[in-house]
Image: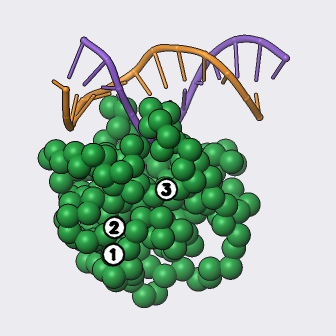
Chain colours: A green, B orange, C purple
Amino acid sequence: MKKLDREFYNRDSVVVAKELLGKIIVHEVDGQRVAAKIVETEAYMGVLDKAAHSYGGRRTPRVEVMYGGPGFAYVFFIYGMHNCFNTVTREEGVPQAVLIRAAEPVEGLDIMARNRFKKEYAGLNRSQEKALTNGPGKLCAALSIDRGKTGADLCGDVLYVEEGETQDFGIVQSKRVGIDYAEEAKEYLWRFYIENNRYVSVI
DNA sequence: CCCCCGATGGTCT
DNA sequence: GACCATCGGGGGC
């Protein structure tokens, strides 16, 4: 399938977040493709968005990659345990990103199952099956994405996003998750997910 | 199903 | 020293 090009990412995060639904994240590890369909995203709109790491123009080593060009990975480490994968959007100097919150396993199911539960996919129970990738930290674990991937070029050959099979699904728009500190920004409807998809993290 | 809470460490003040 | 774009397990229903 066709890989998304840099211009895809060179737009506002609310647009990119919505359009990333149904696309396929691919991570090539040791010559093996591990892939999952994006089913839930959140837009982080940068300097005016109180929920964004780059709010107010904050520019620290951690968030520096958001100030670079579009189409690179921003992976941050959170709560001492988990990683969250974002795609940087907009041109250099405009620090926006889209958080990938959940995905549906497509390829490399045994690899994902081993990464999350140390067993083969066929050995998972129903609840483990669903818990493979239904959250930002879980999908990073399943796809072996950690903060060392920050700066990875999404237009390269290791970690990238492909066109999906179909865009034929309903889209639900809602408030973002886990940003109670963000005052008025917590009310913004900048979260998007595929209607009736079992891998969405929170309904 | 729901609510509650502890784990665990990088990042910034 | 506080905060944190999370997760999983325990207990109640």
Q: Which residue is drawn at 36% across and 59% down?
A: A97
Kind of residue indicated by mark 2: Thr
**Kind of residue sitting beneath label 1:** Asn
Seen from the viewer's position, the closer of residues C1 and A79 is C1
Compare residues A81 and A181 and report the one nearer the observer: A181
Read off the residue under disc 1: A10
Residue nearer the viewer, A185 or A145: A185
Give coordinates of residue A13: x percent, y percent: 42, 64
Name the N-terminal-most of marks 2 and 3: 3
**Is A184 on the left or on the right of A143, as rendered?**
right
Which residue matches tag 2?
Answer: A89
Left or right: A161 in relation to A121:
left
Mark 1 element type: loop
Q: Looking at the picture, do discs 1 and 2 lie on one chain?
A: yes
Q: Residue B4: x, y in percent?
A: 60, 16
Disc number placed over residue A42 in the picture, else none: 3
Residue at 41%, 54% (x, y): give it.
A44
Q: Residues within 10 Å of mark 1 (few under 14, many from 20)?
A: some
Question: Would you place residue A158 above or below residue A104 in this image?
Answer: below
Judge whether residue A76 can be spotted in this image.
no
The residue positioned 47% from the left and 35% from the top of the image is A183
Position of A129 relative to C7 (above/below): below
Q: Earlier in the sequence, mark 1 or mark 2?
A: 1
- Percent position of residue A178, x then y: 50, 38
Assess whether mark 3 and mark 1 are in contact (beta carbons under 8 angstroms).
Answer: no
Disc 2, SS: strand
Q: For mark 3, does the 10 Å Cα neighbourhood hold few (<14), some (14 to 19), or many (20 or more) residues?
A: many
Q: What residue sits 50% from the left and 40% below the top?
A: A184
